[in-house]
Image (spheres, rainbow, N blue to C red):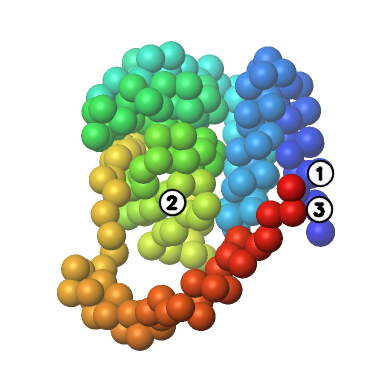
C-alpha cells in the first residue's frame, strides 16, 4: 500500500509534467492526498484526466461567479479548485454558485474541502444524483459509497451552509441539566486546596 506521502509527491510531479506550474502542482498533490485519505479514487481520476488532457483543451475559470458557463469545452477541475481556494473568502458571500460542464468533478472535491476549512463553513456539493457534505476539511460525507463517480458533470452546485447545531435547544438543556450533577459546590476545604492557597512567602 502506497503511503500518503508517496501519493502526494507523485501526484505533484505528475502534475508538473502535465504542464502545470510547481505551485499548482503542489496544490494538486495536497488535494489528491486528501482524496485518497477520505477514501475516494483520486489517483485513478487524476491519471485519467491527464490522459484526456493530452487530447482536449479544457477551459479554465479565472474568476468564479455565481453562475459559471463554458464556451463549449469542459472546465478544468484543477484550475477551478486552485482559484476556489484563493477566492473562497469572496465566493462565500454568494451563498451558492454553480458550474456548467465540469470535467472530472471528483478532482474538485478536495480543493473545496480545503476551502471549507478556510471559510469555516460546511459546503454541500451536488451534481446528477450525487451529494457531498464537506466538513471543514475533516471529512467528506456522501450519499453513496460503492458507485462509480462520473468523469463529467453537466451541472454542479456549491452551497455554503450556515453553521448550526445538529441538536435542539431542549436536547441541550436536558443534557446540561444531567451534567450539573457533576458540579461541586465550593467549600472551605476546596478553597484551602486550590492552587496557590496556603503558600508561604519566604522573601
Q: For the residue labelled by badge 2, is the local secondary structure a helix, a strand or a loop?
A: strand
Numbered mark located on residue 2 in the image: 3
3D distance between C-alphas at marks 3 and 2: 25 Å
Q: From the image, which quarter does the N terminus lie in?
A: bottom right
Label located before the other in sequence (1 or 2): 1
Mark 1 crowd level (few <14, some 14–19, many ≥20, 10 Å Cα): few
Q: Residue at x 51, y 55 (%)?
A: 139
Secondary element under disc 3, as helix, strand or loop, is loop
Q: Do callouts 3 and 2 mark residues in contact (Cβ within 8 Å)?
A: no
- Is residue 145 shown left or right of residue 11? left
Which is nearer the N-term, disc 3 or disc 2? Answer: 3
In the image, 100: left or right of 112?
left
Q: What is the C-alpha distance between the residues marked 1 and 2? A: 25 Å
Left or right side of 6 for 105: left
Instruction: State the CA–CA distance, disc 3 to disc 1.
Output: 6 Å
Residue 145, labelled with which disc? Answer: none
Pick whichever, 145 or 6, lies toward us.
Answer: 6
**Residue for badge 2:** 135
Residue occupying the far left of the picture: 170
Judge by depth and name the residue closer to the eye, 158 or 172.
172
Residue 2 visible somewhere in the drawing: yes
Q: Residue at x 33, y 26 (%)?
A: 91
Residue 115 in view of the camera: no
Q: Are marks 3 and 1 in contact (CB under 8 Å)?
A: yes
Quadrant of res 102: top left
Query: Where does residue 201 sit, x and y in percent of width and height?
Result: 69, 54
Secondary element at tag 1: helix
Q: Nearer the viewer, mark 3 or mark 2?
A: 2
Please say if 117 is above or below 77: below
Circle 1 residue: 6
**Residue under the image location 26 percent in, 27 percent down:** 93
Amino acid at each position: 500500500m502506497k503511503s500518503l506521502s508517496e501519493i502526494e509527491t507523485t501526484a505533484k510531479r505528475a502534475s508538473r509534467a502535465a504542464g502545470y506550474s510547481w505551485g499548482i502542482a503542489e496544490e494538486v498533490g495536497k488535494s489528491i492526498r486528501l482524496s485518497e485519505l477520505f477514501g475516494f479514487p483520486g489517483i485513478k481520476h487524476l491519471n485519467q484526466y491527464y490522459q484526456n488532457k493530452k487530447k482536449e483543451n479544457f477551459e479554465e475559470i479565472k474568476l468564479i461567479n455565481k453562475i459559471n458557463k463554458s464556451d463549449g469545452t469542459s472546465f478544468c477541475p484543477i484550475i477551478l479548485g486552485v482559484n476556489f481556494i484563493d477566492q473562497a473568502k469572496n465566493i462565500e458571500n454568494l451563498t451558492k454558485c454553480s458550474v456548467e460542464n465540469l470535467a472530472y468533478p471528483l478532482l474538485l472535491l478536495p480543493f473545496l474541502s480545503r476551502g471549507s476549512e478556510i471559510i469555516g463553513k460546511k459546503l454541500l456539493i451536488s451534481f446528477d444524483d450525487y451529494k457531498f457534505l464537506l466538513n471543514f476539511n475533516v471529512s467528506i460525507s456522501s450519499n453513496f459509497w460503492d458507485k462509480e463517480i462520473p468523469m463529467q458533470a453537466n451541472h454542479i452546485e456549491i452551497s455554503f451552509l450556515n453553521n448550526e447545531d445538529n441538536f435542539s435547544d431542549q436536547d441541550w438543556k436536558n443534557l446540561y441539566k444531567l451534567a450539573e450533577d457533576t458540579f461541586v459546590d465550593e467549600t472551605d476545604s476546596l478553597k484551602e486546596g486550590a492552587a496557590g492557597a496556603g503558600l508561604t512567602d519566604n522573601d
